[in-house]
Image (cartoon, coloured by chain):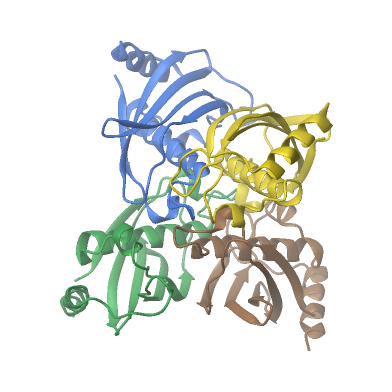
Chain colours: A blue, B yellow, C green, D brown
Amino acid sequence: MSYVFPQKILFKHCDPAGIVFYPRYFEIINDCVEAFFDDVVGLPFEQLHGYGGVPTAEIRTTFKAPSRHGDRIVLVLDCLKVGRSSLDLSIVASQGDEVRFISHSTLVLVNDEGRPTHWPDTVKAKLIQQMKGAE
Amino acid sequence: MSYVFPQKILFKHCDPAGIVFYPRYFEIINDCVEAFFDDVVGLPFEQLHGYGGVPTAEIRTTFKAPSRHGDRIVLVLDCLKVGRSSLDLSIVASQGDEVRFISHSTLVLVNDEGRPTHWPDTVKAKLIQQMKGAE
Amino acid sequence: MSYVFPQKILFKHCDPAGIVFYPRYFEIINDCVEAFFDDVVGLPFEQLHGYGGVPTAEIRTTFKAPSRHGDRIVLVLDCLKVGRSSLDLSIVASQGDEVRFISHSTLVLVNDEGRPTHWPDTVKAKLIQQMKGAE
Amino acid sequence: MSYVFPQKILFKHCDPAGIVFYPRYFEIINDCVEAFFDDVVGLPFEQLHGYGGVPTAEIRTTFKAPSRHGDRIVLVLDCLKVGRSSLDLSIVASQGDEVRFISHSTLVLVNDEGRPTHWPDTVKAKLIQQMKGAE
């Protein structure tokens, strides 16, 4: 099942051309992933970062059309693949029918020393369930 | 010829885990590209944005190892391909022998209305020369 | 009447000490003011910036206690004084009974050329009403 | 003696009105203070945050004139008062003769538990010397 994260484009996101400055999109993507782990996975980042974290190992993003101040975009997050300590995600952001960007990323759960570590069973179950739901 | 952009990792770049928060890397990448257009290409963004801009159409980044507060990384930018209105870049960031991230991106020159437009001849010549110099 | 703006403290807001990096508070303050102009004043920034803007002329902030990742703070915005083209605001941010910061700022409405310009009558009425409501 | 910190206004600093978005100024102010502690005080933040930090307790800023993309501003930092664990600073930012903003802040040295702690003697000596030098 897809996770839906709405975001109004605010003044702080926009550049002198009046469109979103792309590094701000990555802040929005991170907010979306953080909300997903809180709302759906039951593993809020603020707890997670107590014993490690989920750094992004790789991210590929294609910007299809610019977003402007005041736009109300929606990010749709899907789990593509759940590894022992990794998670492949896709995020598609749109306003109405118009796609604004498509992003694929791989996250890795790491321990306090920054080493990859297994997803806890309950977390892994949630991620797989989320993936199955997407089918 | 490669363009070299040094960057000390500052307090503002780092997250609660004490490493660079990856959206900040994209600000650093943008600073590097902006400095390259100013120092080498002779087309400062502040002039360029008068009649358009060079938005990023696509970017793929692999994070190899974390950077910590106080690290002094060096970004090495190379021009891979110069199109009519596009530019393919690679940026490799390292501290000493350790690669921190590798990024490939495609920029597009657009006019005031956001439509792709040809590189001015002198700019294209500089970009191609930079590419040749890389050989 | 006070305007209330809740904000969860997210990963992106926090520094290596695990508390909010204070420049991020100013982004949150700006988000709060932007939401106030949208929700209450009926003058969304995205329209406002079509014919000028409301830059901040002065801001004084006292940080009383740190906020940590996962905290749920609430900003309470009050209009203190409405001038011809200016607006004095206070914002008090708390979690529960604990005040986190207190901020006083002066905004100025400017036209396309950056010159101070009168609040439109309907806007001024809303701002004054909001101030009266605070009594 | 004043500490001088030059900063070119970059694309990332600017908003849809083409001027610096004021929360970005606070990032620049923090960069300036961080560089001052590294270059002059001999207490780099990356070491300092190992055993605590220097959070900002209070900051008052007046924005005199807008800065635009491409401007080359200079921040001039002066130590006004050195307490047991606090430091009062002023920062004046200008381009040429035109002042862009004036900021007064109070920093406090805190230990790992976030409690105020005395400046180490050598640090305090440096700060006082810097203050005397300003006379």
Residue B32, image x, y percentages: 68, 45
Q: Nearer the viewer, residue B93 or C29?
A: B93
Residue A85, image x, y percentages: 53, 17
Q: Quadrant of the C terminus of chain D?
A: bottom right
At 37% from the left and 70% from the top, the residue drawn is C54
Q: Is residue C49 shown to the viewer in this render? A: yes
Q: Nearer the viewer, residue D26 or D131?
A: D26
Placement of D110 over or under D2, stated as above or below:
above
At 62% from the left and 62% from the top, the residue drawn is D28
Placement of A24 over or under C82, stated as above or below:
above
The picture quadrant where one finds residue D38 is bottom right
Q: Nearer the viewer, residue C34 or C46?
A: C46
Q: Is residue D11 left or right of residue C96?
A: right
Q: Is residue B129 left or right of residue C99?
A: right
Q: Quadrant of the N terminus of chain D?
A: bottom right
Placement of D50 over or under B92, stated as above or below:
below
For this orientation, the residue located farthest to the bottom is D135
Residue D131, image x, y percentages: 76, 82
Q: Nearer the viewer, residue A75 or D26?
A: A75
